[in-house]
Image (cartoon, rainbow, N blue to C red):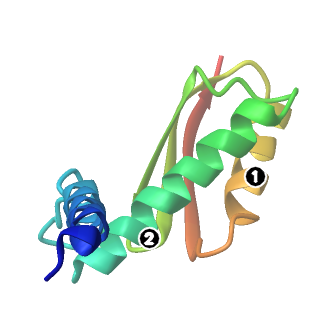
Amino acid sequence: MSFASLPRVLGALAAAAIAAGGFAGCAVTDRQSTIGQAVDDTAITARVKKRMAEDKDVSAMRIEVETLNGTVQLAGFATSQGEKDRAATIARDVPGVREVRNNIIVR
């Protein structure tokens, strides 16, 4: 290896270390079969939360979102049945969602 190629090699090693470290927070639970499924579930949760935050009819701050094997569970509080229903619709429309369990309470 020449001295000139050293920066490229170090850059590749740094990129590999960053990529590997990105999965450190994606622990596989006993109900998730692979790291890939855990990553998919994390991405689904993030997309649902993002879409709720962008929606003027849903308060993303009062609604919790969890995903396991493509099943999204919504929990928390809504101010109307319309808000509860809209949250479920948002979740259903995210690619990769297999099922939505809407446990939001209207109060």
Q: CA distance from mark 1 to mark 2?
A: 17 Å
Residue at coordinates 51% horizontally, 52% vertically from top-left? 45
Q: Classify residue 27 as left or right of residue 71.
A: left
- In the image, which disc is placed on residue 40? 2
Q: Nearer the viewer, mark 1 or mark 2?
A: 2
Q: Please tell me which residue is depicted at 13% across the width and 83% down the height of the picture.
A: 1
Residue that appears at 17% across and 78% down: 2
| Amino acid on which the number 1 mark rests in the picture | Ile
Frontmost residue, 84 versus 68: 68
The kind of residue on which mark 2 rests is Asp
Where is residue 30 shown, x and y percent of the image? Answer: 12, 70
- How many numbered marks appear? 2
Relative horizontal placement of residue 12, taking residue 50 as reference (left or right) = left
Q: Quadrant of the C terminus?
A: top right
Q: Secondary structure at mark 2?
A: helix
- On residue 90, the disc is 1
Decide if residue 37 is on the left or right side of residue 60.
Answer: left
Q: Residue at x 74, y 18 (%)?
A: 79
